[in-house]
Image (cartoon, coloured by chain):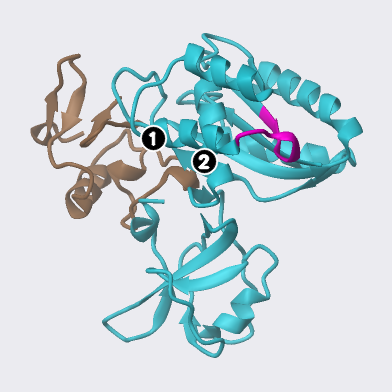
Chain colours: A brown, B cyan
Amino acid sequence: MDNSWFKPNKHGHPTYQGGQEDWETVHGIAKACSSFLVDDEDECVSDLDPSCYNCKYRRWTSRSFTCMK
Amino acid sequence: MKILLTIDDTDNLESAGTGELCETIAASIEEKGWGTCSGVTRHQLFIHEDIPYTSHNSSMCFRANIHEDHLEPIIAFASNFLETESAEGSDPGLCVVNEEALQAPQKLIAFGEKAKKKVLTKTDAYGLAKELSIHLSEHGGTGDGIIGALAGTGLRLTGNDGRFKGHHQIPISTDPTTVKELLDHPRIDRVEELHGEALPLNTAVSLSNKVKTVLLNHDSVLLLYQDPKDQLWKNCTKQHLKGF
């Protein structure tokens, strides 16, 4: 996980600052992430693989997602 | 009789997904000769920090045509299956609705639509299930999955919510194929452009990646878009389908 794109939310969970449609950036972050694990096909929303948006360890929030790794 | 069976909150980060378990229940119903099942649909529910979902808060549902004698065995089988196959730490819930006997389906639909916008409680779910004589049961943990299971059933009942689980294998004789050939696929009821317009049967379609359908007007619908780069009609991408 590239920490420069994540800030802790009020519960301390690292939250992505680019929202839910920052396709290219999260593609780049996932490519460099050793923890990336692709989620079930039905939960994948990005066409750029790998992607944090398709990762089993992302937890969607109302505006973005938190990384659980 | 026609039933809707929905499950929710059966997984954790390491386990098989809820969709996979739902598909296994549907396959088991067919293997046991209890009935025939439609495709499983995924229904997105409210994303909110007060809701303890694993990562995406969605429920999974299918319709089955069964003989009424098989209703109780199906509920018993699905209940036992959830208790043995759900992941540690999950809070599984099961909902089974006899569609033909359902009074006031609009109340169930309204519950489903509300569950996409606000946090609901088990009390809300049990209250409506009792009023409408719907089977709703907890199978481990907090049992919070009953909320999503009931909501997912209401959303499936709308006929206009969610994506079908998995993707379709399309044996095509030509590339590009045509709308007509796509309509021959048993799991595709309609082929439309992204905004709902039908396309002529001889329209050329180039398929790529995984071919997925969505639930629209109670049909399994393959959505297409016209690629501005080459003007070809293509199956919608994951990003196109994210909102379904």
- What residue is at 52 percent from the left and 17 percent from the top? B90
Residue B150, image x, y percentages = 56, 28
- What residue is at 64 percent from the left and 36 percent from the top? B22
Residue B99 magenta-highlighted: yes
Q: Is residue B164 above or below residue B223?
A: above
Q: Foreground residue, B185 or B200?
A: B200
Residue carrying label 1: B116
- What residue is at 51 percent from the left and 87 percent from the top? B200
Residue carrying label 2: B155
Q: Where's the N terminus of chain B, which quadrant? A: top right
Residue A58, image x, y percentages = 32, 33
Magenta-highlighted residues: B96-104
Q: What's the residue type where badge 2 is placed?
A: Leu
Task: Please say if the residues under marks 1 and 2 sit with CB atoms less than 8 Å apart.
Answer: yes
C-alpha span from label 1 to label 2:
9 Å
Classify mark 2: helix, strand or loop.
helix
Q: What's the residue type where badge 1 is placed?
A: Lys
